[in-house]
Image (cartoon, rainbow, N blue to C red):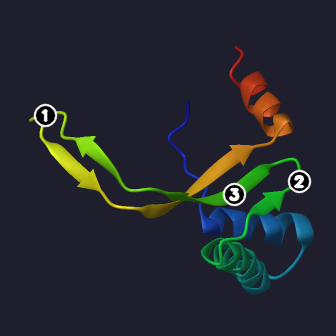
Amino acid sequence: MSDKTLTRMDLSEAVFREVGLSRNDSAQLVESVLSHMSDALVAGQSVKISSFGTFSIRDKAARIGRNPKTGQEVPIHPRRVMTFRPSHLMKDRVASGNKR
């Protein structure tokens, strides 16, 4: 498994090479797409990218947790979390990449 992480710069470079926009326009396009996705998630909307997956927001209720080291009960406050559910195509593609 590689230690490489895909970054915004990598995405904008890919857009530059494959679409033919300037490097500046490619970076702005990537930033714009990520900004639209973030804004939708903040507003509580789901973001579905066909053949990739769905990002959604879940509201988690308050509950009592336990410190595993001491066993002491600790209240966990309600919060919003982002979840990602990959599409079946993405799951299959990732699974086939693991075969060696």
Q: Which of marks 1 and 3 is nearer the N terminus?
A: 3
Q: x%, y% of residue 11?
A: 71, 64
Q: x%, y% of residue 36?
A: 73, 79
Q: Name the residue under label 2.
A: 50
Task: Mark 2: give few (<14), some (14-19) or many (20+) Cα within 10 Å.
Answer: few
* Residue 62 horizontal side relative to residue 47, left or right: left
Give the CA separation, mark 3 to mark 2. Answer: 11 Å
Q: Earlier in the sequence, mark 1 or mark 2?
A: 2
- Quadrant (top left, top right, bottom left, bottom right) of the C terminus: top right
Mark drawn on residue 55: 3
* Residue 81 horizontal side relative to residue 39, left or right: left
Which amino acid lies under the numbered mark 3 shown in the image of this protein? Phe
The kind of secondary structure element at disc 3 is strand
Q: x%, y% of residue 81?
A: 51, 59
Give the CA separation, mark 1 to mark 3. Answer: 34 Å
The kind of secondary structure element at disc 2 is loop
Q: Name the residue under label 1.
A: 71
